[in-house]
Amino acid sequence: MFALSFQFLAGRYHSTPWGRHVNEGVPEWPPSPWRILRTIIATWKLKVDAEEKDVRDLLLNLLEPPVFYLPVATVGHTRHYMPWDKGNKGNWHASKTLVFDTFVAVPKKSPVIAVWENVSLDDKALKLIGEFAENISYLGRAESWCEAEIIEGEKLVNILKGLDNYSISKPLAEDGILSSSEEIVNILCADEGINPKISLDELDKKGNSKHPLLIRTSTLRTQIKNLNPPMSNWVQYTRSEDCFEPSKTSYTTVREEKKVHIIRFLLDSNALPPVTDSLKIADIARSTAISAYGKGRKKTSILSGKDDDGNPLLSNMHTFYLPSDEDRDGKLDHITLYASGGYDEDHQRAIARMERLYGYNLKNDVNLLLLGMFDSDQWPETQNSTLLSSSRIWKSFTPYILTRHPKVTRTGQWKLKNIPENVEIKIPENLAYYATKEYLMLEYGILPDLSGMQIDGPASQLLLSIDKMGLPQPSSIEPIPAYEENGAIKQWLTFKRYRSGKHAPPSGNPYGFRITFPEEIKGPVALGHGCHYGLGIFIPDDQF
């Protein structure tokens, strides 16, 4: 058993059955064995150096009508107006004839396979047909680009077993019985009685080839007066009735929604807001985002931080609105929206519509330029942001605000707790506005001799906030009594710490810290009251 496969690279097989006119719009399907044999001869004449007798012997071995394995197919056509010489040679271009170019459309990766079930070729013949297959560039009309391949033996058996959505077209059985799903189509084949002694190179007196496989249609029309080539016959092939019906296989497309966790904006204004307005800018950004998403009166817990009943969410999966000063000039120039729960595509489209921040007594409107939306693991896009970097040491960018009242007795004395053994309390060298180190430590809820700290004091609540955020216990914490801006030391009290029309924090006193972790922590890091609105933001401390 031996087979030739033809894979049509453009997904089209252009051909017209022998004796039919192109404008009848009838395609040849399956490809006729007569056409395949003539293609082998043409390839030999133009591309392959082989002995004529070897080629003639190969063709004689392939005279048996093959069985075709046909992929799913449909019929298509194109229409062209072509010039046609009707005797007026001086004005031939004015005569235009409509021509139908009918073709069979097949999947590009599904070849047509012709199997000669009773043919066994020797090594010499296999090598020769292999050379022909490598050099066949089209089958049918010249636009039917194809790649041909010989298949035999166990490989052929396995390929035929694995065919999916294929139909079989073969010569009609002697009993002439058809199944209910089959039809008959006449296919031109070579007669097995072709004289083996006729040379492929032999010509008659008029210069025409004597071999029937090389006869021209013009010779058939003008001399023989019969369109059927000599030594050919029409073989009745069975073919599936719905061989040209479009495949009815239905596919359910499941598109996985891709969430992003980080959305970045550049701030632009005639006068950018100062870093002390971080809370105000974050609060306005929150209102703008909720408005952009809720134009259809939709509720969004991921942007608002509240459930459908208006109760605050207890988790930290919702959005952190994080303003930043990335060129360190004391002005806010970026804002980052971060949500560990992720933004679905509806939220992404809504946030992308945000164009400016206004209101809340802003002196100047702030324009928003969307820089990108990406996942937290996409560090090439986020490495330029201090908020999203990785570091062991983090310092306050905006003040840390307490979430609970520090605990005291009825007499006003501190309620104390031990400092965790693995946490070192460092005393800063720069006391800023504090007169003594003792007064500074007491302000931060730490006994001057480091023997304990106030329950729910600033240092105690910072450790609780770190644990609540799922961060590892720090190896040290250090109070930062003031922040630096353009070389000047300024108090944390200069920051806005109250949201307009909202509940005030338990204690409005601001605090700054430097936190050292035992390992690198990936940002963002925001802790304490108002951490979703621009307070309690920490940035990597590049001085260490």
Image (spheres, helix red, strand yellow):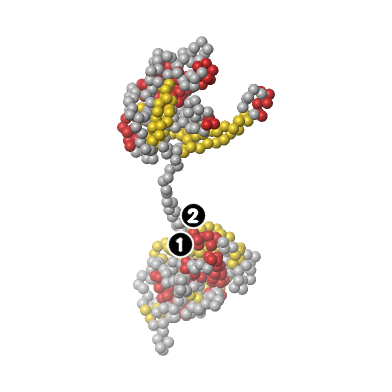
Q: Is residue 437 above or below residue 130?
A: below
Q: CA distance from mark 2 to mark 1?
A: 19 Å
- Determine whether the residue tagged by mark 1 lies in a helix, strand or loop: strand
- Determine whether the residue tagged by mark 2 lies in a helix, strand or loop: helix
Graded by Cα atoms within 10 Å as few (under 14), some (14 to 19) or many (20 or more), the crowding at tag 1 reads many
| Residue toward you, 318 or 366 | 318
The quarter in which the N terminus is drawn is top left
Residue at 63% x, 24% y: name it: 86
Q: Is residue 417 above or below residue 193?
A: below
Mark 2, mark 1: which one is toward the viewer? Answer: 1
| Residue toward you, 276 or 370 | 370
Graded by Cα atoms within 10 Å as few (under 14), some (14 to 19) or many (20 or more), the crowding at tag 2 reads few
Q: How many marks?
A: 2
Residue at 52% x, 13% y: name it: 207
The three-letter code of the residue at mark 1 reads Gly
Residue at 36% x, 73% y: name it: 420
Q: Which mark is residue 542?
A: none
**Residue 360, horizontal then vertical, whole percent:** 59, 73
In the picture as drawn, the residue positioned furthest to the top comes out as 205
**Residue 30, horizontal then vertical, whole percent:** 43, 31
Residue assigned mark 1: 342
| Residue toward you, 114 or 476 | 114
Residue assigned mark 2: 380
Q: Is residue 428 in sight in this rendering?
A: no
In the picture as drawn, the residue positioned furthest to the bottom comes out as 411
**Residue 394, horizontal then vertical, whole percent:** 46, 66
Q: Tell whether label 1 touches label 2 (CB within 8 Å).
A: no
418 left or right, relative to 215:
left
In the picture as drawn, the residue positioned furthest to the left comes out as 154
